[in-house]
Amino acid sequence: MHDYKNAPLGIFDSGVGGLTVVKEILNRLPCESFVYLGDTGRYPYGPRSADIVRKFALQNARFLMGFGIKVLIVACNTASSVALDELRKWISIPIMGVIEPGAREAVKSTENGRIGIIGTVGTISSKSYQNAISAIEPAIDVFGKACPLFVPLAEEGWLDGEIPELVAHFYLDELLQKDIDTLVLGCTHYPLLKRTITKVIGGKIRVIDSAKSLIGELKKYLTDEKITSNNDDLYARFFVTDAPQRFSRIGTKFLEKKLEKIELIQIEL
């Protein structure tokens, strides 16, 4: 591949949630170009079977590989839970998911060895965070809770106020009884609701944002491998499989900056 250093990063998610990862890239890796694919036509991945999510992940990855990317970032927790091994069989470039970085950060953070994980039904039932944490520190107690309504709230921009708070109480009150001192936001949509979540759980519980943990590890990897971009000719391209206007509207909220050109593509089913 020509000029590997200045090749873009490739990022995919089931929808707009992965823009929390993009936001961290813009903040912490401002010299990197990237191509983002939001699979909005087949969103959400959370309730789907593992086999279907693996199939979608491979199709998304194949599309991004066409841009000569240097690292593939699976910004979707559900796809990170079930598809990374399959992707690594077919793709030779480095692949990073959101789960292992989030798990490592949570293990570092906890003092009482009791960690809560919130995510989609798919992420929680896969036990991927539980397994990743146990692999690092088997003595830690992990409590998972699926919070399926958080994603539509984030997508609709209902981030504060009575309804998000009621939903947060409904999901989180049970976790609070487990005496957790660390809570992992195991879905890239959830950082949008961080204010509401923090209000409900109180200020003493440390909140781990997997997107931030991932970009910390990505930055280190690019530096260690000496493949940090030194290109002035930066670009960011955004592709979706449906509803570009909706993506632009919600994405502008996520990134707190106007998303100009969203390109609509078809991925074969």
Image (spheres, grey):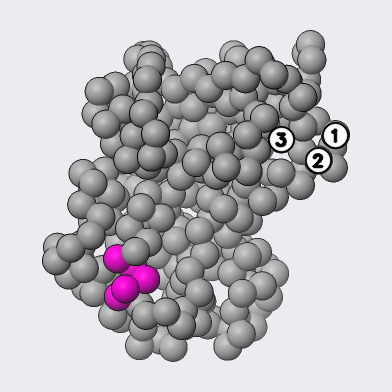
Q: Is residue 199 magenta?
A: yes
User: Which residue does the image show at 44% across and 22% down from the upper left?
Assistant: 238
On the image, which quarter does residue 240 sit in?
A: top left
Q: Position of residue 226 (x, y in %)?
A: 85, 34
Q: Which mark is residue 226?
A: 1
Q: Is residue 38 magenta?
A: no
Q: Which mark is residue 94?
A: 3
| Amino acid at pointer 2 | Thr
Residue 223 marker = 2
Mark 3, other Cα within 10 Å: few <14 / some 14–19 / many ≥20: few
Mark 1 or 3: the one toward you: 1
Q: What is the quadrant of residue 267 in the picture?
A: top left
Residue contact at pointers 2 and 3, CB within 8 angstroms: no
Q: Does 13 sit left or right of 158 as displayed?
A: right
- Specify the quadrant that holds the N terminus: top right
Nearer the observer: mark 2 or 3; the answer is 2
Q: Which numbered disc, 2 or 3, marks the residue that appears first in the sequence?
A: 3
Looking at the rendering, the stretch of residues picked out in magenta corresponds to 196-200
